[in-house]
Structure formats: structure tokens, C-alpha cells
Amino acid sequence: MMLVVTRTRTVLTAFTLVSVLALGACSDDDPEPKFAPTPSTSAPTDMTTSPSAPPSDPLEPSMPAEATRDSDAGAEAFVRYWIEMVNFAQRTGQTNGLRKLNDVRCAGCRGMVEAIDSAYRSGGHIVGGELSAGRLRELPLDFGAEWAAFANARTAPQTVVRQDGTKEKHDGAPFDLYTYVDWADGWSMRWLRTPS
């Protein structure tokens, strides 16, 4: 069962990609994301075993040349690059590059960026939660997209460390990732879906 979450609760509980990717569906017709039940939060633990702060100067991934082409191979390369950018944004809190890859109509994309921004804006950071995807298989077009694909995907375990030291932990999990991308002088993520 999925819960519709208010904007306030979204900001408070949806700090992570795992929560955002627990969406049943998200589009411009569904402005409020749907989230899985709230993850657990724990008190700070011994600092020697706690996740460390993010690296100070990580390099943003570069878009591969293939991802700039209006072709099936270009769309697939773009989706893989987008996943790299999600991982980079989670690791660093730097979401501008990811935001530029997202279509303004993609509510799931917006929710993801807002969740990452919220975690870092409040003085916290995110450890883990890397997204990986297997082979992309083309899907019928929908949602105004020019290319769509499905992949078996996985998120790694993740911890959101808040400024006060409290931690919100998420188990890694497999999921089905549906991506819909659109071309307008370059690819953009138009719509995301993960079945509930």
C-alpha cells in the first residue's frame, strides 16, 4: 500500500533516493509523489563506526559523447549517465547537474532533487545508496517521451546523517526502473516509474 505524502512530510522524510524510487508512479498528472512508509531514524552511535562525511572535491561525471546523440544508443547512454549523476548528487549534495538533465514536468525527478537538497541544506550528508541498473530493454512510448526503457535495478544500503548526528538508514533493495526520456536539443528525463 502506498501513502500519498504532503509536501511538508515529503521534505521531512524523503531525504533519500531509496524513498524517492519507492514511487508507484510520478508524472505531471500526479504532482505529489507517493512514498513508502517512513524509514527508521536512530540516535548517533560511536563516531568510529559512523559513516564519514562526503569527499570534499569529487569530480562531476562527464556526459559521454554518445549521450548527446538523438538515437536509441544515445538515449541509453543518457539514461546511464543520468544514473551516474544521481549517484554523484547523493554523494556530494551537488544537484545542479542532475537538475539540468531532468524535464521540468518530471515530478519524480523534482522530488529526488528536493530530497537530496534538503538533506545537505540542513547540514547533513548522504552515505551510500548508489543506484545501479542492468540491461535496459526498450518499452512502448508513453508520457510524451521519445524513448523508454525498463531495467532491473538496485539501490545500495544508505544512511542519511543529519547535522545533529541522527541517522536515517535505508536497506538496499532491488526494484524495477522504468525511464522515459525526451529529446529537445538533448535528452532529458521525462518520467520515472518504479512499480510498487
Image (cartoon, grey):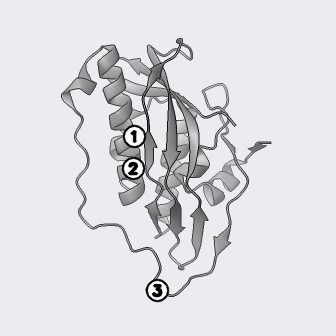
Q: What amino acid type is highlighted by mark number 1?
A: Ile
- Mark 3, Cα crowd under 10 Å, few <14 / some 14-19 / many 20+, is few
Front residue of 54/27: it is 54
Locate the N terminus by quadrant.
top right
Q: Which mark is residue 162?
A: none
Which residue lies at the image location 39% right of the left edge and 27% below the top edge?
188
User: How far apart are the alpha carbons under marks 1 and 3?
Assistant: 30 Å
Q: What amino acid type is highlighted by mark number 3?
A: Met
Q: In the image, is 27 to the left or to the right of 113?
A: right
Q: Marks 1 and 2: CB-CB under 8 Å?
A: yes
* Residue bearing the label numbered 3: 47
Q: Marks 2 and 3: CB-CB under 8 Å?
A: no
* Residue bearing the label numbered 2: 87
Which residue lies at the image location 47% right of the left edge and 69% below the top edge?
124
Q: Earlier in the sequence, mark 1 or mark 3?
A: 3
Q: In the image, is 185 to the left or to the right of 4?
A: left
* Residue bearing the label numbered 1: 83
Q: What amino acid type is highlighted by mark number 2?
A: Asn
Query: Could you tell me which secondary element the residue under label 2 belongs to?
Result: helix
Q: Marks 1 and 3: CB-CB under 8 Å?
A: no
Locate residue 126, reporting x and y percent. 46, 63
